[in-house]
Every structure is written in C-alpha cells, then in structure tokens.
Image (cartoon, rainbow, N blue to C red):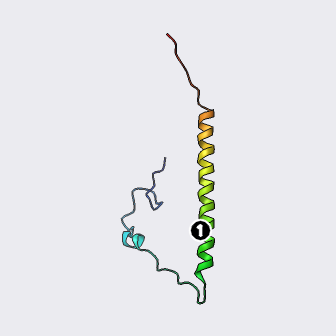
Amino acid sequence: MTTTSLCGLPLPLPATFDFAAYMTTPPEVPAPVGMNLAPKNARNLVIERTNCGYVQQLRSARLQSLWSNMYIVVYFR
C-alpha cells in the first residue's frame, strides 16, 4: 500500500521538496479585451443549476439503491 501526500507525492516527502513553490497560487488569467461577461455569467448559472440537479439525482439514486439492498430483520420473542 502506497501512502501519498496531499500533493500526490509518495510519503515521506523528499528533503528537497519546495513547500513555498507548492503553496504559491498562479496569477489570474486576464479576460480577453472586449469580452462581455453578462452572457458568460448567465450561461455559467444555468450550468451550475443543471449540475446541482444532477447531484440531487445521483444522491437520490444512491439512497434508493441503499434502501433496496437493505434487509430489515425483525426478531420475535
């Protein structure tokens, strides 16, 4: 069994691992000139709502699957 760190490297981390470089975030990518954000934001909202709906469907299906595979045992005395 291989144990890995959060960064995906096998543990223990090598002594040369650069923690500062790993923790830095890259600079933001600037939006193209003339790009209208309103339609993009509206589209992203539709996609996000759709994704949330799919997540709910998946959770519901998993829950139904769990209940259908569950056996209820009743003991009588």
Q: Residue at x 39, y 56 (%)?
A: 12
In the image shown, does 33 or 2 lie closer to the viewer? 33
Task: Give above or below for 21 relative to 58.
Answer: below
State the residue lying farthest toward the top: 77
Q: Is residue 62 left or right of residue 27?
A: right
Label total for image:
1
Q: Secondary structure at mark 1?
A: helix
Q: Give x and y (percent) for residue 51.
A: 61, 60
Q: Amino acid at mark 1?
A: Leu
Q: At which x and y percent is residue 72?
A: 56, 25
Residue occupying image coordinates x 36% and y 65%: 15
Q: Is residue 62 left or right of residue 76?
A: right
> Residue 67: where, in percent of width, then height?
59, 34
73 up-or-down from 65: above or below? above
Residue receiving disc 1: 45
**Residue 68: x percent and y percent?**
63, 33
For residue 42, which quarter of the picture? Answer: bottom right
Q: Say few, some or many: other residues with alpha carbon within 10 Å of mark 1 (under 14 / 14 to 19 / 20 or more).
A: few
Which residue is at 48% across, 50% downward? 2
